[in-house]
């Protein structure tokens, strides 16, 4: 009588949880002095309160801008320039939100940041920092009342504050407008004053990159327009020798003509 050995095969199913660290899909832009957030979270959502969370920046030594370890923030581990300026939401950690809040942004904060939880893939966030500049445009001698438009270097309309209008004793209008823009490399802007009823238009062009500002300033010296190192403003004034004697004047605050920097 033959004996048969019967072997049994067992199959066990296991579910593998793969967690990812997800950063922002595109670079983050900020202006000096802003408070901004660099997004980063765990996916699928899970508590990070009991984990180590590290934010570092490329090229920085020491490299840490924020460290969360053993349930506490380690302020002493941060690079000195980031102390008391970076934080993570404690309540957000419980849901896997490890976004970094950066307060009082500086120009030196620009760079690539790394969001890291040990044993998980890293994620990156790129931060670009610009300076905020207020431009003012004024035009005199109009009738009827014109409108003022601001455009960027690509011809897109910018959102500006309300236009101020003054009517003089000669019944001619003076209009002025201000717009706050971000100082970026090779940024040029146009103030356009136009009168739709009579189809008249005047423009003033402003470039707020340092190199162009210097050349503009030198040109103004040649035109006998005051450009002083101690002056609070530089005035660009285009004189139109037309019958209606209209002129356009553009103002960039606090330009130092020697160093060609906006402050």
Image (cartoon, rainbow, N blue to C red):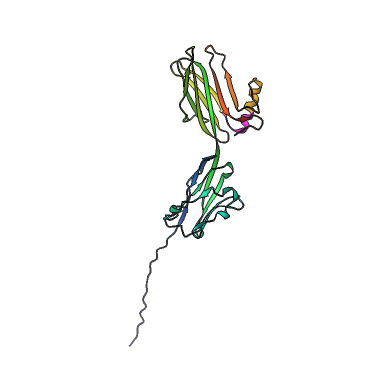
Q: Is residue 209 magenta?
A: yes
Q: Residue at x 53, y 46 (%)?
A: 126
Residue at 52%, 25% in the rendered image: 191
Q: Main secondary structure of the magenta part?
A: helix
Which of these two is toward me, 87 or 97? 87
Where residue 180 appears, as percent x and y from the top left, is: 51, 32
Task: Tell me if residue 154 can be seen.
Answer: no
Front one among 33 and 155: 33
| Quadrant of the snapshot with the N terminus | bottom left
Left or right, 56 with respect to 218, comes to left
Query: Is 227 or 56 nearer to us in this picture?
Result: 227
**Where is residue 222 drawn, in percent x and y?**
66, 21
Q: Position of residue 240 (x, y in %)?
A: 56, 16
Residue 14: x percent and y percent? Answer: 40, 66
Quadrant for the C terminus in the image = top right
Q: Is residue 233 magenta?
A: no
Number of labels in the image equals 0
- Most distant residue in the left direction: 1
Q: Nearer the viewer, residue 84 or 254?
A: 84
The residue shown at (43%, 56%) is 94
Left or right for 12, reference 122: left
| Residue reaching furthest to the bottom | 1
Is residue 226 something one can see in this rendering?
A: yes
Give the magenta part as a residue range: 207-214
Q: Is residue 212 left or right of residue 203?
A: right
Q: Residue at x 47, y 20 (%)?
A: 165
């Amino acid at each position: 009588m033959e004996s048969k050995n019967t072997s049994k095969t067992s199959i066990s199913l296991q579910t593998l949880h793969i967690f990812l660290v997800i950063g922002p899909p595109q670079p983050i832009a900020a202006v000096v002095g802003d408070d901004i957030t660099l997004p980063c979270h765990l996916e699928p959502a899970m508590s990070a309160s009991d984990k180590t969370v590290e934010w570092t920046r490329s090229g920085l030594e020491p490299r840490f801008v924020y460290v969360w370890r053993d349930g506490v923030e380690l302020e002493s581990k941060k690079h000195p320039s980031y102390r008391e300026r970076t934080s993570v939401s404690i309540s957000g950690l419980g849901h896997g939100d490890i976004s970094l809040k950066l307060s009082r942004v500086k120009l030196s904060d620009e760079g690539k940041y790394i969001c890291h939880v040990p044993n998980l893939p890293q994620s990156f966030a790129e931060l670009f920092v610009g300076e905020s500049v207020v431009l003012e445009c004024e035009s005199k001698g109009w009738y009827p009342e014109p409108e003022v438009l601001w455009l960027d270097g690509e011809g897109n309309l910018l959102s500006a504050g309300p236009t101020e209008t003054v009517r003089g004793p000669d019944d001619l209008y003076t209009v002025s407008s201000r717009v706050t823009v971000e100082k970026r490399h090779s940024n040029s802007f146009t103030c356009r004053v136009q009168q739709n009823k009579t189809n008249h238009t005047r423009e003033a062009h402003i470039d707020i990159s340092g190199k162009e500002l210097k050349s503009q300033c030198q040109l103004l010296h040649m035109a006998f327009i005051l450009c002083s190192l101690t002056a609070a403003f530089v005035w660009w004034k285009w004189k139109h020798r037309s019958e209606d004697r209209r002129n356009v004047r553009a103002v960039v605050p606090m330009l130092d003509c020697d160093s060609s920097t906006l402050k």
